[in-house]
Each structure stands twice: as structure tokens, then as C-alpha cells.
Amino acid sequence: MTGDDEAADSLANSLRGAGVRALFQRIAHQPTIVKLRVMSRHQQLLRIDFEEPFATDALALSGQVDELLEGIKVLVLSDYGKGALKNHQMLIQAAKARNIPVLADPKGKDFSIYRGASLITPNLSEFEAIVGGCADEHDLVTKGAALMADLDLGALLVTRGEHGMTLLRPGHPAMHLPARAREVFDVTGAVTP
């Protein structure tokens, strides 16, 4: 979802230039969300977000899902609560009916909307908001296995900041992947638990 404005035109042109097929639902009198990065000497000093919640729930994707899934190899649901994703289950079930894996970066306090996804990727804070605090890796694995069973998930990847990531899959031992330190100039989007 975007506004019907210059920012949406710029985004469309950038995506087109990168070879990305994008379908925007443009909302009149609604500004496109813009994130402005202030940089100095290749380092980000701050990010300023210009956004207003979308005041409409008239998402017109539902009638186009079958057409949009043609030729798709994976469906990624990245939900930041801005109003673009309204019916996660319709999208997940439509993809599953075509054997298309569904990867979801969950947000919010209701992970049941991702039921049946192939993989969800919460960070540790998001995960603990759903299952409760984890005292150690064993606790994380136990609670993660219960969440996967409850939501019929194919896999669960919990990102844990400087502690790396934990990948859980039914019938497989937990994989704890370490973080690798490196110098980063733009940490926008990075979330620490």
C-alpha cells in the first residue's frame, strides 16, 4: 500500500529498475511511508520516519491472489502492521495449495495468523512476547517446539542478536548458529533483544 504521490512513483521506478514486479495499491490522500536516513561519512546518524496509519482496510489483493501466485517460487509475508496484510491465512492457504513455501517475519502479539507457514522468523523479544521468557537455550527449544506444534509450522528461526540464531524443525535437533561480528555502517532494521 502506498499513497498516490511522488514517493510512490520514485519507489515504483526504483523497483522496476531492479527488475522487481511490484503491484501497488495506491490510496488517494494518503502519504506513502518514507524513511529518511541521515548519513555522514558512510555512517548512519539517524533515521526519520514519515508515516501515517492507512485509514482504509480496502485491500484489493484477495481477488488477485491466484493470478499473483502464478510462477512464484516462495511467498514472503513481512508484516509491519501498516495495513497491507489483512488476511494472512488466505495467503498462506493459497500458497500451500500450490506447494509454494511461505516465509513470514511476524509482528504483533498474535502468531496464530501465521498458522501453517513454512517458516516464521521472530526475533527473541517477539518470540518471548508470545511464549514467555526463556531462561536458557533448552527453554527456548522447548517453547519453540510447542509453538511449532501448536501452529503447524514447518520451521522456526529465532534471531537472537549477538547470540546468533536458533533454527528449529520438527524431527531435527536444534541448530544454534553463532553471530559473526563485523563492522556495520547502517544498522537500520537490526533489532536487539
Image (cartoon, grey):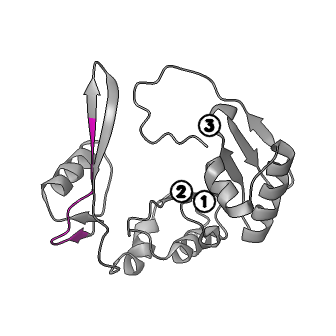
Residue sitting nearer the eye, 174 or 18: 174
Q: With 18 as the anchor, is 108 left or right in this view?
A: right
Query: Image quadrant of residue 84?
Result: bottom left
Image height of 40 relative to 53, above or below: above
**Numbered label attached to residue 161:** 3
Q: Are marks 1 and 2 in contact (CB under 8 Å)?
A: yes
Q: Earlier in the sequence, mark 1 or mark 2?
A: 2
- Compared to residue 71, the image places residue 65 above or below, namely below
**SS at mark 2?**
loop
Of the residues under marks 2 and 3, which one precedes in the sequence? Answer: 2
Q: Tell me, yes or no, whether the highlighted magenta stretch contains residue 97.
A: no
Residue at left 62%, top 65%? Answer: 99
Query: Label 2, on which residue?
Result: 74
The three-letter amino acid code for the residue at tag 1 is: Pro
- Seen in the picture, residue 104 relative to 89 is either above or below; the reply is above
Q: Nearer the viewer, residue 65 or 184?
A: 184
Could you tell me which secondary element the residue under label 1 belongs to?
loop
Crowd band around label 3 with a 10 angstrom C-alpha radius: few (<14), some (14–19), many (20+): some
Mark sitting on residue 101: 1
Residue 123 in picture, x, y percent from top left: 61, 48
In this picture, which residue range is highlighted in magenta?
26-37
- In the picture, measured across the screen, residue 7 lies left or right of residue 55, that is left
